[in-house]
Image (tube, rainbow, N blue to C red):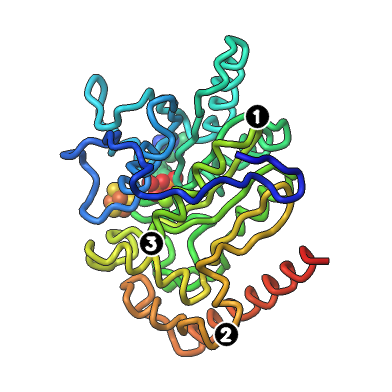
Amino acid sequence: MVRSEKRGVRIMPLRVMDLDKEEYVLPGNPSCPGCPASLGLRMLGKVLGPKTVLVIPASCSSIIQGVYPKSSIKLPLLNIAFAAAASTAAGIAAGFEAQGKSDINVVVWAGDGGTVDIGVQAISGAAERGDNIIYVCYDNEAYMNTGIQRSGATPFGAWTTTTWTGKKRWKKDMPSIVVAHKVPYVATASIGYIMDFAEKLRKASKYKGFKYIHLLAPCPVGWRFPPNKTIHIGRLAVRTGLWPLYEVEQGVFKLSPICMPLLKKENRIPVIEYLKLQGRFKHLREEDVRRIQEEVDELWDNIRRKLEDARC
Ligand SMILES: Cc1ncc(C[n+]2csc(CCOP(=O)(O)OP(=O)(O)O)c2C)c(N)n1
Ligand code: SF4
Ligand SMILES: [Mg+2]
């Protein structure tokens, strides 16, 4: 590994054969078919390995983990109140540091409700202090575990049980909020590109300080699509430009290689191709779809500007 202030951490690309053969999420757990949370957690174990402690606030994942004394997750795990996840992880990391155990990954694995709404003050505190943790938000864009209520991460237009006619507000840009704390590593990822997520997890583990990965996690139950389409929807989110994959390493914005072609509008799939596959968007009017498309095009104009600034 090479560490450089300007270029960030440079490591050899991760291959499937480099992943831990061990399964850290056991079969037979209570996740729904096609669940993105169990898939993401499975990959997390395979990248970070046994020297990992998980902190999980209330969410679908706290159901997937099982009921004490049984557990489907073969890693030390603390289930914690929503608002306390980042601060609890910070305390655990400080404890390990005091004991000279610097090789243990302390990871928060939290939903979007537990992150962008309820957990935000503890995240901000941990990020500002530079606490040595990895925070992963798996974003299924609603409070799924309690029956699909809208969160700050629910996108514009989406149906939830508390936005019957479609959400009227735009999705909260949590990765940018974390970037504003000047932490060493922030990245976006999608379950649709699982090896990209794996690579970003590995990179996060090489940095000391607060690391944040925001993982888009298409949920068949809440988004209303068949369970065999989780990966497809996760890829379409990226390829329409709705969910750009990027890293901000030591303050430097980098578009992930998968997304480079999307800088040209003609390479982006129209957003309607993503929206029409999901029941949560079936009520959208043509003008709603047009607004979403315009928002995406504007987002990519901003990305182009950011890349130009980074080159200066
Ligand atoms: C303080 C508190 N309020 C409400 C709940 C009920 N609750 C449990 S899980 C959950 C939904 C969490 O949503 P999110 O963080 O997005 O995770 P997901 O369920 O989508 O995986 C809620 C509201 C709780 N456990 N604690
Ligand atoms: S509701 Fe969605 S995120 Fe929750 S367990 Fe089911 S598929 Fe997974
Ligand atoms: Mg959620």
Question: Which amino acid, mark 2?
Answer: Lys
What label sits on residue 131 in the rendered view?
A: 1
259 or 59, which is in the foreground? 259
**Contact? badges 2 and 1 (CB < 8 Å):** no
Q: Secondary structure at mark 3?
A: helix
Q: Secondary structure at mark 1?
A: loop
Q: Is 45 displayed left or right of 182 in the figure?
A: left
State the residue at coordinates (47%, 69%): 238
State the residue at coordinates (22%, 64%): 228
Q: Secondary structure at mark 2?
A: helix
141 or 74, which is in the foreground? 74
Picture quarter containing residue 132? top right
For label 2, the crowd category at 10 Å Cα-Cα, with few meaning under 14, some 14 to 19 and many 20 or more, is: some
Could you tell which of marks 1 and 3 lies nearer the N-terminus? Answer: 1
Q: Which residue is mark 2?
A: 265
Q: Which residue is mark 3?
A: 192
Image coordinates for residue 214, horizontal then vertical, percent: 52, 51
State the residue at coordinates (50%, 42%): 202
